[in-house]
Amino acid sequence: MDARFTAEQDEIRRTLRELLLKRCGPEEVRAAVRTPAGYDSGLWEALAGQLGLPGLALPEAYGGVGCSVTELALACEESGRALAPSPLLSTAVLAAPLILALGSASQRTGLLPRLASGELTAALAVPGAGLATALGLVGDNRGDWAGGGRAGGVQARRVEGVWRLYGQAAQVLDGHSAGLLVVAAHTGGFARSRTLLFLVREGVEGLVRVRQTSLDETRPQARIELRDVEAELLGEDDPDDPDVPGALAAVGDTAAAVLATEAVGAADRALERTVEYVRQREQFGRAIGSFQAVKHRLADVYVAVQAARSAAYYAAWATAHGENVGGLALAQALEALRTASSEGIQLHGGIGFTWEHEAHLYFKRASGDELLFGPVHRLRRYAADAARLFDGGEVTV
């Protein structure tokens, strides 16, 4: 692989960084997360209308830019640096690829151009707290994680040719504000148990959406209740079942690569802020950054961030070449972010975890992403199991 960035990739990063520096500082982030939508609609219009981020990895035939996942990942690295709250992850990384992979011709032509332009936002709703499982990041997603209504999941049934959904999804990213929900539901009963995806439009009768209090305010979440809601099957309505678990796993690997680069951006910014602080903060008549112990701690963080960056870039490149390494890259990036943010809090002293300071926001992003997409140890364990690293008895060193 050629590790050098193209001129277009460098331009995407530069343009987005300049925009976020102007419009997404710490105070703007705090103000945005307290709005009903949970993000700055003006900034979203700029990201979508001026830069075309939601359609960056969508084909030109559907109003997208036609770039690869690498460009989308680089854009998310910059948004991660600023902890920019936006529906980019839920719309462009989770929902749109599923519509592209499984949607009918009319669904793709009707929805993807609106998603690419930012006019419409979307969210993926899976039952319970099973997002990491549904995306195949911490275990095989071909089980019964979709539940069955009373079991805490979502049940789908067909009545007079119309699909209707009943159940609940507890942790839906941007679910309170999205104009379109892609809902995973269980159907078929015991005889033909299967998981299918359905489209639920905003404002449909029986849909209840409640924004939840989340650890990471920059990733707003909602509880979705479906009370006999009319829905549209994602894909062609024919006897051949779509490979929903396979499509979700493919999206999960891509999402893991994008999330890894986003976490790297956040870790890099947390490290930068800490280095700036230790150069200014004086103790015993000298800057604390001159102490050897502080230098060693920050050097360890720097190595961890650079190693995570290499893994994340490779994972983004590998998604287009048939390699599934997103989960491993995400594990390394989340660990680097947790290390960088926790060291930042420690080296900032007493101000590092106050509401007025931004250091704690990076720590909450690391913790929140582990809750949503899987703890580091489970991401690594499943990757090792999938690669059959420990089959065949003892491992010799």
Image (cartoon, rainbow, N blue to C red):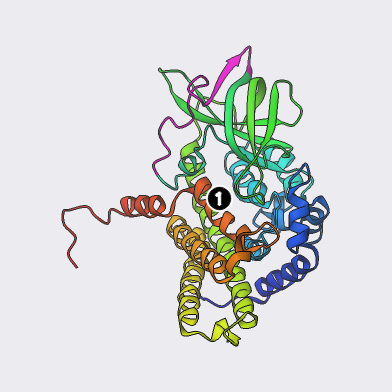
| Towards the viewer: 239 or 58 | 58
Q: On screen, 2 above or below 168?
A: below
Q: Residue at x 49, y 65 (%)?
A: 339
Can residue 366 be seen at all in this image of the molecule? yes
Q: Quadrant of residue 67?
A: bottom right
Q: On screen, 277 above or below 69?
A: below
Boundaries of the magenta span: 139-162
Q: Residue at x 28, y 53 (%)?
A: 388
Q: On screen, 109 above or below 3?
A: above
Q: Does the magenta stretch mainly form a helix, a strand or a loop?
A: loop
Q: Is residue 264 left or right of residue 393?
A: right
The residue tagged 1 is: 368
| Residue 119: % across, % down | 79, 46
Q: Is residue 332 left or right of residue 82?
A: left
Q: Residue 152: say if magenta.
A: yes
- For the residue marked with disc 1, what is the amino acid? Gly
Q: Residue furthest front?
A: 284
| Residue 392: % across, % down | 17, 53
Can residue 68 be seen at all in this image of the molecule? no
| Towards the viewer: 231 or 172 | 172
Q: Residue 220: say if magenta.
A: no
